[in-house]
Image (cartoon, rainbow, N blue to C red):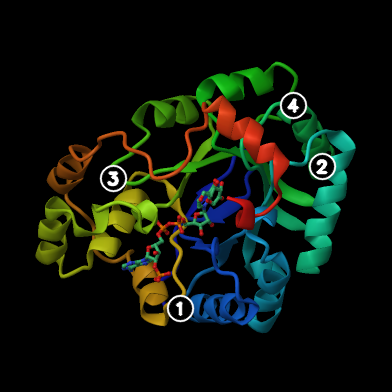
Amino acid sequence: MTEIPYQTLSNGVHIPQIGLGVFRVNDAQTVIDSIKTAVNTGYRHIDTASFYGNEAAVGDGVRQSGLDRKDLFVTSKVWNNIRGYQATIDQFNTTLAKLKFDYLDLYLIHWPAEGYEENWRAMEDLYRAGKIRAIGVSNFEPQQIEHLMETATIQPMIDQVETHPYLQQTKLREYLSINNILHEAWSPLGGGKNQVLTDPVIADIAFAHQLTAAQVILRWHIQRGTIALPKSTHTTRIAENIHVFDEALTDQEMTKIAGLDTGARVGSDPTDAAFLKRSTTYDNQNHN
Ligand SMILES: NC(=O)C1=CN([C@@H]2O[C@H](COP(=O)(O)OP(=O)(O)OC[C@H]3O[C@@H](n4cnc5c(N)ncnc54)[C@H](OP(=O)(O)O)[C@@H]3O)[C@@H](O)[C@H]2O)C=CC1
Ligand SMILES: O=C1CO[C@H](CO)[C@@H](O)[C@@H]1O
């Protein structure tokens, strides 16, 4: 089995460059089976959130995978309805209890909803107490990170944002790189909501390498140094999505993919104040 490449967070913690996403995997047995399949095919990283409503099943999947807890990197996120210092500590403890873990690898502020500075202060204390190995943000634009840094004592170690060939996040990546913050991609395959998996440029490159379109896109993420979180519940696709480490894309192919950026999102815009406000009024995906 090929060893998965990893990136190193600013505090020295290693994060595997491919992680299994489990958003919209609602049936507990399916979550468990997907994690077992993923671990068998080489995954060592799972991305969940309280919002996904499946943390308990993720914990069961990790225990049933047969791996030691320390050999898996697990992320969760605090949703937008949780505001303030104590509420964040309480929510984190609920997350740990659902997972039945005694620590988390990475905890993220899910979106920059108003008041995130206090959520961050709580996360800093949980990090200092050794309950979380790394802390970061999700869906933060540079100006939101700058605003957070006015009161933060620890800089976010990662920013998890929508990224795929149609939304390459070039400017944000520059900012993150200068500030030593890792870039993590959600909906790395376009979330099944755009045409990137059938794009002719990707198809040509896939043909040249005898890879699938999904593998070309994931390989592109890997070569950019991004951490990608593809989601699938199908055994063959879970395996396909991690077999991307043997075949490198050429510089010319990377340039062709760079030309596909249209800036079109498949998810919400992190600067959409109305969405951010609305999202503080519900706590799970059934309200979305
Ligand atoms: N921080 C945030 O705000 C967000 C974080 N996320 C995280 O990112 C993860 C991934 O995002 P998601 O939106 O699910 O998008 P993805 O880009 O991972 O796309 C998932 C879709 O692609 C399909 N798919 C997966 N692999 C293949 C393949 N090899 N060939 C063809 N189709 C494939 C899946 O279908 P099937 O399952 O049927 O195989 C599904 O429909 C989430 O699960 C979550 O962990 C997602 C959204 C927001
Ligand atoms: O993680 C998430 C999953 O996708 C949702 C959109 O459909 C997002 O709002 C959320 O951030």
Mark 1 or mark 3: which comes first in sequence?
1
Mark 4 or mark 3: which comes first in sequence?
4
In the picture, measured across the screen, residue 172 lies left or right of residue 112, that is left
Q: Position of residue 256 (x, y in %)?
A: 14, 43
| Residue 41: numbered disc | 1
Res. 182 in view: yes
Q: Quadrant of residue 206?
A: bottom left
> How far is disc 2 from disc 4 in space, using C-alphas?
11 Å
Q: In this rendering, which labeled residue sits more in front, label 1 or label 3?
A: 3
| Residue 115: numbered disc | 4
Q: Residues within 10 Å of mark 1 (few under 14, many from 20)?
A: some
Question: Which element carries disc 1, helix, strand or loop?
Answer: loop
Q: Quadrant of residue 56?
A: bottom right
Q: In this rendering, which labeled residue sits more in front, label 4 or label 3?
A: 4
Measuring 42% from the left and 81% from the top, which residue is drawn there?
Answer: 235
Q: In this rendering, which labeled residue sits more in front, label 4 or label 1?
A: 4
What residue would you read off at disc 2?
A: 88
> How far is disc 2 from disc 1 in space, using C-alphas?
35 Å
Quadrant location, the N terminus: bottom left
Whether pointer 1 and pointer 3 mark residues with C-beta atoms closer than 8 Å, the reply is no
> How far is disc 1 from disc 3 in space, using C-alphas?
25 Å
The one nearer the camera, 271 or 109, is 271
